[in-house]
Image (cartoon, grey):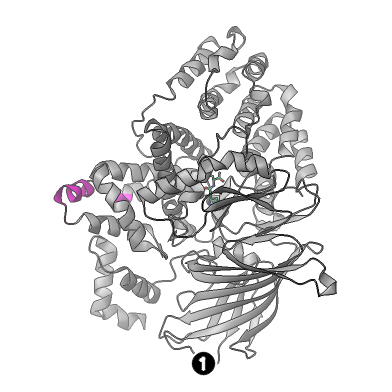
Amino acid sequence: MVLAFNKSPLFAGFKLYCYSQKTSVSFSFRRRMASIVNPPRDPNTLSNYNNFVTTHTVANFSIDFEKRSISGNVILSLKSITDAAAKEILLDTDYLKVENVELNGKAPKWELLPRLEPYGSVLRISLDKGVKNGDSVDLDIQTETTEKCTALGWMTPAQARSDHPYMYTQCQAIHARSIFPCQDTPDVKSTFEFNIKSPLPTLASGLATGIKDLDQDSAAVGTKLYSFKQEIPIPSYLFALASGDIAKAGIGPRSVVATGPKEIQAAKWELEGSTEKFIQTIEGIVFSYQWETYNVLVLPPSFPYGGMENPVFTFATPTLISGDRENVDVIAHELSHSYSGNLVSNASWEHFWLNEGWTTYLERRIQASVQGESHRDFSAIIGWKALQDSVAEFGDTHEFTKLIVDLKGKDPDDAFSSIPYEKGYTFLSYLEKQIGKEKWNKFIPHYFTTFARRSLDSYDFKANLLSFCESDATATAALNNVDWDAWFYTPGLPPKPDFDTSLVDICYDLAARWEETKSDKFEPHAQDIKGWTANQIVVFLNRVQGFATSLDKQATQAMGTTYGFAKSSNVEVVARYFQIALKARDESIYNPTAELLGNVGRMKFVRPLFKQLNEANRALAMETFEKNKDFYHPICRAMVEKDLFGKGSKESG
Ligand code: BES
Ligand code: ZN
């Protein structure tokens, strides 16, 4: 069939397009052709989404805190998109029990295939006859999570700092398949309905549509049915639930913050000044906010990320609530994902920079607009350091240092780093400079309008920018100078942009004085950093990290006490300071580091701190991991295990 197709003029056109990528063949044409000619463009799913796509998902689940499982049924509406009359439906599952499958109300033949690492087991449903292109079937699957589920964090009341237990999901990148069978790829988008039974307040990545008391059912006293809908199609990785003793408070005309009742006032204070301002700012940059409400759930300390852009409710680390409103850039970031990632999604994790690079770009445009232009580069300078660190960590020829990465056979979690964020940001800023800010500002809403509710890859992005500039000779000439392949496929650092260093010069100067005078000869004074923002301290500490091994422990101790870093309430500051002190082998901070590792589960801090502690005192690192491994989210636990023990597979989790 492919051979015959090969000779057709359509295929010739498609091939030509692939090579030049300059002509603007329509997006849907390309997608249709791609599904026929090529394997699916996402290599990290085992589903046959080139034959069927999920258009609607109903999740009817019960949360069982005793058993630590989620069970129920999920109904997938699957639309056939080929004439090929595929005779099977293949869905992703990972460590999932599947109890029953119904296809349009009847019992089809189905089986769970053997595991294929790192992607899990395919649920194969046989079809008697193919489904006509454009027709849909309903699959109703009874399912239950197992203790090996990688997407769920379960907390005891103590771990939740509460009188009640707590649970939350984290599905990005490929963990949704560990909660329910699905086409676990960002290249497929579905609307959702959630009906969730839980004894505790529950929220989801949809708009609340009702709460029903189920008290009459004596086996489940206090259990309620929480319902939500998500009418904007979303990929599986944005499926989210959280349940626990959750209170809410308003932080703006279309926003609430949700967190434990004891923490709610502090969370409200931290966020109420910025949230609506950020929303209005991004509306000015892109277009109106599409998801009706923007809310933030502040999670217990084991939450493995700074933030996760689940629609309607951003999930956020409690380290955000630092009492100084200095970490609200996390909100600017997650809010920006409402456009890049959630509305316009990367088609596979190989093009993750389209999610995170665009989001970092929009986040910095918000900062520039709210705090002043110099803040854009201030943040970019911190980002550049993170980029350098990530490149150094992988090695500058490593596949994962490219903008487009090859993830065939790989686990996207292993490729995660600052590279898609910062190389992506640098690339977008470079393109902005090439065509000029005025033109670029018009391209932003054009791009988000073109791909809204869809998924795209880097070649779609390129084609869209080229076609947008087509009628503008200057912009087209500028884009002709862009070496796309070099940006997409060269590993290592991109050319360093010129940054406006006005906000960081004093931080560099102070770091230079520490470096020049070295160790004990430098006498610090609290005055040195008077009036500095936490981010300026971060810039200073980032610089010091570069020569920390040449400092002795008296020096780092003086730094920690005189500048107050050791006791800072801002984890961004403490964690960096501890890393410096660990490098200087200051034994007095070994135990405080171990203590911090028992209070924070955010991987950004946990992984480097474990690595440094491991080098300074392996026994203590091991002991600290053993003590806290149940506290960490399974993703974090697996990553730290890999870092400490070099274990390669998800089995080790
Ligand atoms: N979507 C990411 C978090 C993520 C990425 C989860 C990949 C799972 C896999 C989120 O938007 C993010 O980037 N969070 C950052 C915060 C931000 C301010 C850069 C984080 O967690 O540090
Ligand atoms: Zn992000």
Q: SS at mark 1?
A: loop
Q: Position of residue 289 (x, y in %)?
A: 43, 56
The residue under label 1 is 129
The mark total stands at: 1
Q: Position of residue 269 (x, y in %)?
A: 60, 39
Q: Is residue 653 visible?
A: yes
Q: Nearer the viewer, residue 409 or 169?
A: 169
Q: What residue is at 52 percent from the left and 26 percent from the top?
A: 533
Q: Position of residue 395 (x, y in %)?
A: 49, 40
Q: Nearer the viewer, residue 120 or 340?
A: 340
Assign the N terminus to one quadrant of the image.
bottom left
Q: Is mark 1 within 8 Å of ligand 1?
A: no
| Image height of 447 relative to 643, above or below | below
Q: What residue is at 53 percent from the left and 85 percent from the top?
A: 137
Q: Is residue 48 left or right of residue 103?
A: left
**Segment colored magenta:** 471-485
- Badge 1 amino acid: Lys
Q: What residue is at 41 percent from the left and 53 percent from the top?
A: 354
Q: Nearer the viewer, residue 364 or 134?
A: 364
| Image height of 53 relative to 230, above or below | below
Q: Which residue reaches farthest front?
A: 253
